[in-house]
């Protein structure tokens, strides 16, 4: 029993330690603030109201820093959003499947910015469910024992930080099906086991297994609105439908931000929630950054993107099909599934089916259900439509979109929901170009930069940039994508700014 407890603890140590030791030191923050003098001397502009930008802006406003948040869209949230169809009969979630907000760093962050107690969280019925041609495995909530066998080999997780997930599994698991089961959440991090940091996978997945995986009631847009409200209540200003175009410098330091409305906002600091590639590559004056830094930046790849089909059904599915979010693998393993996604081979790739009505009663209106079918894919298959899409010539693009949607619906009908096509009342689809249009993320990336071995954890690009006063707070920065990743990124950017100003 003792051995089991210790082992369980060691496996979960990293995520727990991470939560505890990385907490903001408010004594230090107060000491920095005391040295700063009048706070009106620190006007700050945050570019982008995705969750990373909102988190940083909320901390800054709470601290009394005069903060203006610019958002090019008309509502906050970035990917953490939802939209209505059929006159509001169906409300579709854009991104969230599961997030771990419970007794951990993300819960602390949301509590510090005054949002946690207003947020309605619903525990998912299971962490994930894998369906292959010959098995179906649900992974239960808050029951990490299934993973303990792996942990037994690794009393010190830190030792594995230089290994890919594939290396880690190869060392200790022989059965290929078991390997696939243990790595089934690869889609949450956007890379297959051969490219993904084993340490990153184990700690983040350990977090889900230990703290549970949650959905936000009713949609992730509720969280985004609460965060925006927290920024404004604390004295911050949010300007919607206002894009940042250029970051102006004076003597090598940030001086202001030129907006799409023709204004220039003076700034002693700028925090960018927009993509790092755009911020550092397009918004700054030419040659502002050291070439070594730019070359490194160019060597990093945007993460995987997504093709989504949302379906509004004229039937209640709640409780009739097991599970909430089922990852349906092709049976050819995660490497082949990732390759099919990158190549846009929708017939052969894996996909997931999320039955949101299984999360809580009343998710959809009576007599209806709401589904998301998700195929993680590369940008390349959609790049050929880029120019036409931008110019509003969308016929060929739409035909391809409908073709992909038809394939995905057929696959979901065959493998998860019999009779699906006869229940469809509303259908909508989004491609990597849709992602790019709404969030301006290059290549429609959903997790910022890939969590590749040369850009993860200790090696991850820093939120503090070489330009004095310019910080990143997004999936592109540290620690990376996902809701919990960008909460932490926003917090880190705030901490670094305070250190730089008052340290
Ligand atoms: C289909 C899908 C499923 C996902 N599932 C999950 C999941 O289950 N769990 C999870 O944790 N994560 C999930 N994610 C990932 C997660 O949603 C993202 O990693 C995270 O929300 C990114 O947040 P961000 O702060 O980097 O900002 P983003 O969401 O990328 O938003 C950036 C914001 O900046 C704004 N902006 C950009 N340029 C400018 C400019 N020049 N001026 C003004 N504003 C600008 C954009 O309009 C946008 O609002 C999913 C994502 C997708 C797409």
Image (cartoon, helix red, strand yellow):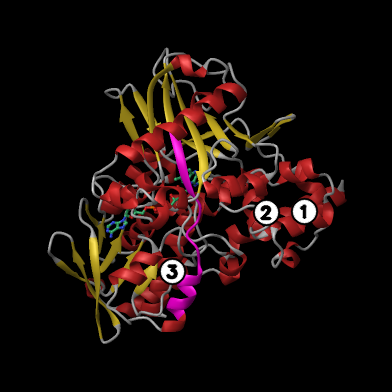
Whether label 2 touches label 1, CB < 8 Å: yes
| Tag nearer the camera, 3 or 2 | 2
Where is residue 431? Give x, y as percent: 40, 42
Which quadrant of the figure contains the C terminus? bottom left
The range drawn in magenta is 293-309
* Disc nearer the start of the sequence (1/3): 1
Residue at (43% x, 42% y) in the render? 117
Q: Is residue 295 magenta?
A: yes
Say which quadrant the N terminus sits in: top right
Name the residue tied to disc 1: 169
Q: Mark 3 to mark 2: distance in Å? A: 33 Å
Return the disc, 3 or 2, that comes first in the chain's sequence. Answer: 2
Tell me if I can see residue 145 in this picture.
Answer: no
Label 2: how many Cα within 10 Å (few below 14, some 14–19, many 20+): many
Q: Position of residue 401 (x, y in %)?
A: 40, 36
Q: Is residue 248 left or right of residue 160?
A: left
The residue that mark 2 highlights is: 193
Q: Is residue 228 magenta?
A: no
């Amino acid at each position: 029993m003792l051995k089991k407890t210790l082992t369980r603890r060691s496996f979960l140590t990293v995520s727990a330690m991470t939560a505890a030791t990385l907490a903001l030191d408010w004594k230090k923050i107060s000491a920095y603030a005391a040295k700063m003098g009048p706070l009106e001397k620190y006007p700050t502009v945050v570019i982008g109201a995705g969750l990373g930008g909102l988190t940083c802006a909320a901390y800054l406003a709470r601290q009394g820093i005069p903060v203006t948040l610019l958002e090019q869209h008309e509502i906050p949230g970035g990917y953490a959003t939802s939209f209505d169809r059929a006159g509001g009969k169906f409300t579709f979630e854009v991104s969230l499947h599961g997030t771990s907000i419970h007794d951990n760093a993300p819960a602390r962050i949301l509590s510090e910015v005054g949002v946690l107690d207003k947020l309605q969280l619903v525990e998912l019925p299971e962490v994930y469910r894998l369906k292959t041609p010959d098995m179906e495995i649900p992974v239960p909530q808050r029951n990490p024992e299934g993973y303990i066998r792996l942990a037994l080999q690794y009393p010190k997780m830190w030792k594995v930080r230089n290994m890919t997930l594939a290396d880690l599994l190869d060392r200790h698991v022989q059965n290929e099906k078991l390997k696939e089961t243990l790595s089934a959440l690869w889609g949450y991090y956007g890379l297959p086991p051969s490219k993904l940091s084993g340490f990153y996978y184990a700690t983040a997945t350990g977090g889900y297994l230990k703290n549970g995986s949650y959905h936000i009631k009713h949609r992730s847009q509720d969280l985004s609105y609460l965060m925006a409200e927290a920024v404004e209540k604390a004295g911050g200003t949010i300007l919607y439908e206002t894009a940042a175009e250029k970051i102006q410098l004076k003597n090598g330091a940030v001086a202001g931000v030129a907006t799409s409305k023709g204004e220039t906002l003076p700034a002693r600091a700028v925090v960018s929630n927009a993509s790092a590639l755009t911020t550092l590559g397009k918004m700054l004056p030419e040659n502002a950054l050291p070439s070594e830094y730019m070359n490194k930046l160019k060597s990093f790849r945007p993460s995987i993107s997504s093709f989504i089909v949302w379906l509004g059904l004229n039937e209640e599915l709640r409780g009739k099909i097991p599970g909430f979010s089922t990852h349906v693998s092709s049976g050819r393993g995660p490497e082949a599934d990732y390759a099919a996604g990158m190549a846009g081979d929708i017939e052969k790739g894996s996909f997931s089916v999320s039955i949101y009505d299984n999360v809580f009663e009343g998710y959809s209106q009576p007599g209806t259900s709401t589904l998301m079918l998700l195929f993680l894919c590369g940008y390349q298959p959609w790049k050929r439509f880029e120019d036409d899409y931008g110019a509003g010539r969308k016929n060929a693009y739409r035909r391809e979109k409908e073709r992909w949607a038809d394939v995905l619906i057929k696959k979901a009908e065959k493998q998860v929901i019999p009779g699906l096509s006869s229940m469809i009342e509303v259908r909508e689809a989004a491609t990597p170009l849709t992602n790019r249009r709404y969030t301006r993320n290059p290549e429609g990336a959903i997790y910022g930069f890939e969590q590749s071995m040369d850009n993860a954890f200790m090696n991850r690009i820093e939120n503090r940039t070489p330009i004095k006063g310019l910080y990143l707070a997004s999936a592109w920065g540290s620690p990376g994508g996902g809701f919990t990743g960008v909460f932490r990124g926003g917090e880190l950017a705030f901490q670094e700014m305070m250190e730089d100003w008052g340290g």
